[in-house]
Image: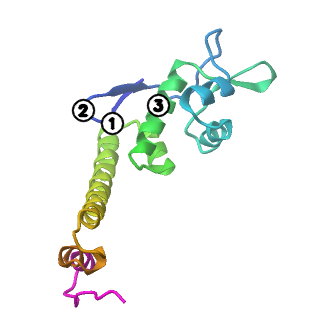
Amino acid sequence: MVVVSLDMRATMRLNVDMKSSPDSSALSIGQVAERFGLAAHVLRHWESVGLLEPARAEGDRRRYGPDDLYRIAVILRAKEAGFGLDDIREMIATREPTARQAILQRLEGDLVRRIAEAEASLDLIRSALNCDHEDFTSCPHFQAMVRDRIGVEAEPHVPV
């Protein structure tokens, strides 16, 4: 069992060996998909790329136990943070704490950059929405924000 912290508030324990054993409390793929609001094919795909390895019951049916549910929650939280499946697999599969820390630091840097870009986009939209000009594209403040994004001194845009 390895502890992975995706933020300062939540710590999750992962079974890095992935194998779960079927028991009476294990859930079917349909039950798990419904619980997490996913399509069953998503869980199958995650299994095919090595993120999940649910136990198998009679008839080769997938059975998901508590360790699988925790792993799915970690995958979803990481996807919500913008991590790709390869990054998630690398983070989960790595047994070395220092290697996992390095992966998380790299992903944190990517996330901080994306948040800054999203905040700049939100500022641009709010500037346009709060503009007193009839056409916000003629607003000097809006134009300055766009010029900043271009990264060069550009002539003010005059709408046609």
> Which three-letter amino acid code belongs to the residue tagged 3?
Ala
Question: Magenta-highlighted stretch: main secondary structure?
Answer: loop
x then y, percent, for residue 81: 38, 45
Q: Nearer the viewer, residue 42 or 154?
A: 154
Between marks 1 and 3, how big is the CA–CA gap? 11 Å
Between marks 3 and 2, how big is the CA–CA gap? 16 Å
Q: Secondary structure at mark 2?
A: loop
Is 153 situated above or below 8? below
> Which three-letter amino acid code belongs to the residue tagged 1?
Leu
Q: Is residue 113 left or right of residue 36?
A: left
x then y, percent, for residue 23: 64, 11
Label 2 Cα neighbours within 10 Å, binned few <14 / some 14-19 / many ≥20: few
> Which three-letter amino acid code belongs to the residue tagged 2?
Met
Q: Give the mark, 3 or 2, whose residue is nearer the N terminus.
A: 2
**Residue identifier under label 3:** 73
Q: Is residue 117 left or right of residue 76?
A: left
x then y, percent, for residue 108: 29, 49
**Image quadrant where one finds the N terminus:** top left
Q: Secondary structure at mark 1?
A: loop
**Residue identifier under label 1:** 6
Q: Give the mark, 1 or 3, whose residue is nearer the N terminus.
A: 1
Which residue lies at the image location 29% right of the left edge and 88% below the top edge? Answer: 158
